[in-house]
Image (tube, rainbow, N blue to C red):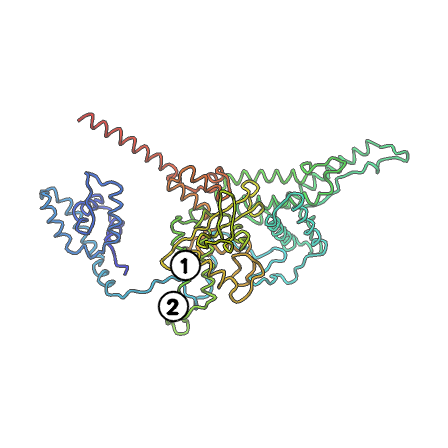
Amino acid sequence: MNSKTIFDAYSDFQAANTKVNKSTLRSVIHRFLVKHWGGEAPKGGKATNEEVFKLVELLKKSSASLLVGSMDILEKEFVSQGIAKENSKSYKSAYKAFLKWVEIKDYFKKVEEENQKPDKPENIFTRNAHGNGRKAKKNYHNTTFKTPYALMAKDRTGKLIYSTDYINSNLENELRLFQEFRAKKYNCSDKTIEKDIAIIYRILGWLHRYKNVDLEDLSLSSIIKFIKLNVSRSDFKNKKGELNHQKYVNKKAMVREEAMELAKENRKLIEEYLDFLRGHPNSKLIIINTCLAIGKFVFRDEVDTDEDIDTTDLAIVKRLKELSKIYNEKAKYTPPSVPHSDKSVPWKQTFDILQLLRKRIHCLAHEYLKKETGKTEIRLRTKNAIISDLQRFLSLAFMILIPTDRSRTYYELEIGRTFVYGLYEADGNRFTPVDKLRDKSKAAWWIHLMPGDYKTSKTYNEYWGLMPNVKFDRDNDLYSYIDRWINEGREYGQKCNHNCFFRGIKNYETLTHEGWCLRIRQIFAQELDVPVTPKELRKMFITHLNNIGATSPELKGASHAMHHSQKMQESVYNSQTIMDRIAPIYKLNERMLKEFFDLSEEEEE
């Protein structure tokens, strides 16, 4: 039963009253009454921080009913401690004011009413499963939602939003060649190329819907205009094979000037699109980088030829790099669209959410409001709903029970390849699968990443990370939930056409970066109304480590486990407030001052 506590009454009184001396009231409770409620009075003339902390914890557990008759207890304490009547007046006055306020606010009545109420089962669902409809989408960025405009945009069911959309044959061929170009020339990962293509579809959709470019005319040259840069010497030779050098040089100069003018126009078009997007400069830098990639592709046959034209010589590349520099500077002085404080929670609270998700797995029925009757009824939950809760639980568990990795590690996690069960021996860098182990109890789940499996793999190479078998209660640990998911949940109702550990909720397909981010964000938005993303989880973890005073080796270990440098850890992921950052030096200063002045007092004596 959640009856009112002394702490509730004390906190409410302190917030509502400014006239009563707050330190006097706390002294009355701490020095004279707390020992009658199972606590300890301060040992010295002034209560230490630890003693105050213990007092608060006790008051949070003590029912407000203990305040009944506490004035008589206080009077007896004054007598037993030999406190003169004139010295106890301020104590009595402060405590009487408190008791009178508690009585006026009916705290004693509330305690009686709550003690008469039967215990209710814990409500582990934030909203009814039936009858309330879909929860309205919340706008955390305070921006106007745009109508989907990307070329070939699809709805939640995978159906085209614009039924007349299509990709013309020339564009289809260009996109195929672009992907090959990015992979072979620049060794880009599939995920990087996938993001480039998504951005290209958005720009092409904008050109079609807002700039009235016909679908049949769309191409990568619609984004970055092409002009032939190479000037053939043979075109300026006479019949004897002699080069007219002046005409040749003039033509090259004319082509270069035309290219510069075209690059200016191109930059204006891209800036117009960036203005259309709005948003943070960092988001626009991503678009500019993709446009740079398009530019290098469009002019690929014009560079590294006999004319000695290098990629950096391209007018469009120069213009886009100028634009990139501008937005880099803007990004330095532009606060995030949503401040970290608005999209994060204390790290310990993530474990509360994890436990809530875990409890739902074991909930076979729950209450729901029936609209027709307005009555609350009990309905058995479907197995599919329970399995969905199991996957949500494991999704969050995998992110917070180990040093939080990038999203890609989780949505690409592959059973038997990047997620393996067996014995790993670091001494010989040797892994033995469970089916080859004599002692099966030595097996554990490991995340095993090779070069190419994660963003910074070229720097950190092969990685082994243990997934700890956390014990949640007497009957359930993490591995039991993993086994249940693999054997009962992952392919419940239909087969998966892949070997990834996680899957889509409805279509059972592999998850995308956007899909994974949406899953994590929805978990926190639904439970706490805070849109915590996977990236914010990484920030929250590092911020927590700094707040609890993690050592330098511990922070270095975290940077390796999370696959980023210590410089990035401090500049990007550590989101401590200024007060948290300076707290250690203030604590040290307080100790130094205490040592000095305590010593001075001893010398005076």
Residue name at image x 52 percent, y 57 percent: 502
Can you tell which quarter of the image residue 237 is in?
top right
Residue 236 vertical placement versus 167 (above, below): above
Can you tell which quarter of the image residue 367 is in?
bottom left
The three-letter code of the residue at mark 1 reads: Arg
Q: CA distance from mark 1 to mark 2?
A: 18 Å
In this figure, which residue is indicated by the disc labeled 2?
A: 367
Horizontal and vertical percent for residue 323? 60, 40
Q: Quadrant of the N terminus?
A: bottom left
Residue 141 visible in the current orientation: no
Judged from this view, the residue extending furthest toward the bottom is 373
- Where residue 191 is drawn, which disc sits there? none
Q: Quadrant of the C terminus?
A: top left
Residue name at image x 53 percent, y 54 percent: 411
Q: Is disc 1 placed on a helix, strand or loop?
A: helix
The three-letter code of the residue at mark 2 reads: Glu
Horizontal and vertical percent for residue 168? 70, 56
Residue 104 visible in the current orientation: yes
Q: Is disc 2 placed on a helix, strand or loop?
A: strand
- Where residue 358 is drawn, which disc sits there? 1
From the viewer's perspective, is 234 left or right of 434?
right
153 and 304: which one is in front? 304
Judged from this view, the residue extending furthest toward the front is 438
From the viewer's perspective, is 380 left or right of 451?
left
Mark 1 or 2: the one toward you: 1
Q: Earlier in the sequence, mark 1 or mark 2?
A: 1
Residue name at image x 73 percent, y 41 percent: 302
Determine crowd level at label 1: few under 14, some 14-19, many 20+ residues with C-alpha closer than 10 A. many
111 and 454: which one is in front? 454
Determine crowd level at label 2: few under 14, some 14-19, many 20+ residues with C-alpha closer than 10 A. some
Horizontal and vertical percent for residue 490? 51, 61
Can you tell which quarter of the image residue 325 is in?
top right
